[in-house]
Image (cartoon, grey):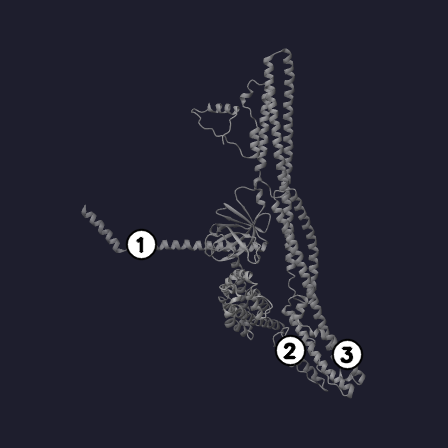
Amino acid sequence: MAEATPPRGKMRFRRNAASFPGNLHLVLVLRPTSFLQRTFTDIGFRFSQEDFILKLPAIENFALTVKDMAQMLQSFGTELAETELPDDIPAIEEILAIRAERYHLLKKDITAVTKEGKILLTNLEVSDAEDAVSSRLEHHQQICGDWQTINKLLTQVHDMEIAFDGFWEKHQLKMEQYLQLWKFEQDFQELVSEAELLLNQQAELADVTGNIAQVKQKIKKLENLDENSQDLLAKAQFVILHGHRLAANHHYALDLICQRCNELRYLSDILVNEIKTKRIQLSRTFKMHKILQQARQCCDEGECLLANQEINKFHSKKDAQKALQDIENFLEMALPFINYDPETLQYEFDVILSPELKAQMQTIQLKLENIRSIFENQQAGFRNLTDKHVRPIPFVVPASDSLIRSREPFFSPKQGRKTWRQNQSNIKIEAVHDCQEKSSSAQSSSLDNGNSLDVLKNHVLNELVQTERVYVRELFAVLLGYREEMDNPEMFDLIPPLLRNKKDVLFGNMAEIYEFHNNVFMSSLENCVVAPERVGPCFLERKDDFQMYAKYCQNKPRSEAIWRKYSECAFFQECQRKLKHRLGLDSYLLKPVQRITKYQLLLKELLKYSKDCEGSVQLKEALDMILDLLKSVNDSMHQIAINGYIGNLNELGKMITQGAFSVWIGHKKGATKMKDFARFKPMQRHLFLYEKAIVFCKRRVESREGSDRYPSYSFKHCLKMDEVGITEYVKGDNRKFEIWYAGKEEVYIVQASNVDVKMTWLKEIRSILLKQQELMTVKKQEQHNQLTEQNLSSQRNEGPCRRWLSYFNEATLLNGK
């Protein structure tokens, strides 16, 4: 843009033109863009040396002083803008103090220069008054010119001071906010570390197994954690209030501060809810153990009562009546414990009972049933004694550590009492009339103390088989009652037109899953009941078949979209009515997803009770197989949600892992400066690690139903693994690491949610880079071997024939000469 050139500028151009031998056709005026530099250039020292020819030395010295002052301010401003910022609070505070001191010194210098100029003006005014008296016009005009020069210089000093004060005010505010942000971030990171520590400690209390003393100890630990959490919550509230004050004062990092406050609220809520849930769970577990303890005491009292009812004590009808009353009192006390079952406890206490607790409850109930049966027979004997004065028939007293090993599956709510009654028919009660010796031998044979681990393992195995049968029946009902009905002409009018050709999308490959389980897998599992060591191979031999679940899960978002659109149609309601299902179709479409998750839970329990047993190694491999399948399914669900990637993601190789991170983008050239304040605000990115690349995506926030289960991602950029490097430790936060690209031209500082996630990613990236290096070494070796082989082959081809031909050619040339 053309600008009018001021007269002073024209004079400067003429002086510059005199320094060049040719004619000047174009002059470019370079103006600085920095606020401080532009200000000082515009109002800086505007006078050339010619302006001070024939001036008083004092005026010339003052002009040079003003020029030096302007340069000092310029240098100080440049230093403030370009100085590297430290990364710790004490150093920042020290720099702030030093800069403030230098600012005040410069202000004193400006005041001194202003004072000097005013003194010169005063002297000139006095001199001018004397000259006016002497009527020396020429000298008077010169003094007026000097006065104007000094006045202009003072005006310039004043303008410089105003510009410098404005710059300092903005800089000081920025530095104070920078320091505030550092303190806020430091407090935030300390609270996050404390909160994660408390969350990890409470997570260790998740296992509700063990005896009553262990559960009581866990409750005590949880109370201590709760006390510590209250202190943490108070600190978090203080930091959040601090963040609100910073935001209210228009802090430049407003978005980051608000994000940190929200993270603290979220962590606080998580911590409170987790501790509350653990307290309820442990309290109910403790109460359950108390019930078991009371039931055991009831068993002991019953056994003690039987032991004290010896034949020789009942010599009269009164003794018999008292014994009869004692028995009735015991049976009344024992009845609540006998009628308890684990399923009722699970519902009452809202906690999933472990197989161990279920087995303990069943054992105690069986003992109480046995004791009650003995007492009922004893009652009949005492009644006969009170009526006829005959000697009663004493019964065998079960030992306190005796157990009845049940070969039947553990009871369900419907058949529990029946199973117990069938078990009771197998209990042999031997009457002993006069021989006390036979009592002890019969006592050891009446109840058998079984292996508790075998009982627990059998329970889990039975649960695996029973739930498999239920699962297959449910799949069959859905396929027959819904899928096949879509082809029923009588139901055709109830189906919306756009739904009629969506059967394969709605049900996915559920029919394939049903055929596999019904025809192959269920029978194999049933065979494992008599051979538990076959469970692991049963899963491993069908590893490829289980991949059909990945296909089903990948189709699930499309299936749910159809269900949400047509769930209220008459067809689905009529099918549900015919099947007499309490839940809708969507609950049954979720069964395959739930089943594959249930497998890993049951395999974990089975492995827990199969340590050092035959088949435990294969069982562990089967569990790993299911876990890998679940991870693969989860990763694939995220991959299909990536939008905007140009190309085929499958060409990047196998997806290793994925997760959410905070990401800063930077460069290795130079440290953080004033102009890089924006780096404090990270980008929220979802990273996908493939064998050949790292893909950066942004998670899209959508309000549609189901978006929490099936997220959506926008592709941002991709880093090829053959140009990637990592730095494992970043100063300031042990959750951070660096991913650098193309020789550190691009540096991505990545912050994981916790240290474990960070270490997992570093391990996987190192593994990929190591494999790349090994492949490169092998490739170079192959190229070297190929080149060596070519050389050897060339030498072999130059055999006797080629050498003879060479000699022949040489001889021909010689003869020609």
- The earlier-in-sequence mark between 3 and 2 is 3
> Looking at the image, can residue 107 be seen?
yes
**Picture coordinates of residue 604 (x, y %)?**
58, 66
Query: In 3D space, how far apart are the residues under numbered discs 3 and 2 (Cα atoms)?
Result: 28 Å
Q: Report the number of numbered marks.
A: 3
Q: Nearer the viewer, residue 124 or 218?
A: 124
Residue at the spot 56% in from the left edge and 37% down from the top edge: 82
Residue at disc 2, secondary structure: helix
**Picture coordinates of residue 460 (x, y %)?**
59, 70
Residue at the spot 73% in from the left edge and 85% down from the top edge: 393
Query: In 3D space, how far apart are the residues under numbered discs 2 and 1 (Cα atoms)?
Result: 91 Å
- Tell me, for residue 795, which label it has, or none: 1
Residue at disc 3, secondary structure: helix
Q: Amino acid at mark 1?
A: Gln
Query: In 3D space, how far apart are the residues under numbered discs 1 and 3 (Cα atoms)?
Result: 110 Å
Q: Quadrant of the C terminus?
A: top left
The local crowd at label 1, few if under 14, some if 14 to 19, many if 20 or more residues have their Cα within 10 Å, is few
**Picture coordinates of residue 216 (x, y %)?**
70, 64
**Is residue 461 shown left or right of residue 438?**
left
Q: Which residue carries the number 3 mark?
A: 326
Do the residues under discs 1 and 3 have CB atoms within 8 angstroms? no
Q: Which residue carries the number 2 mark?
A: 418
| Vertical placement of residue 382 versus 806, above or below | below
Residue at disc 1, secondary structure: helix
The picture quadrant where one finds residue 598 is bottom right
| Vertical placement of residue 275 versus 175, above or below | below
Q: Amino acid at mark 2?
A: Lys
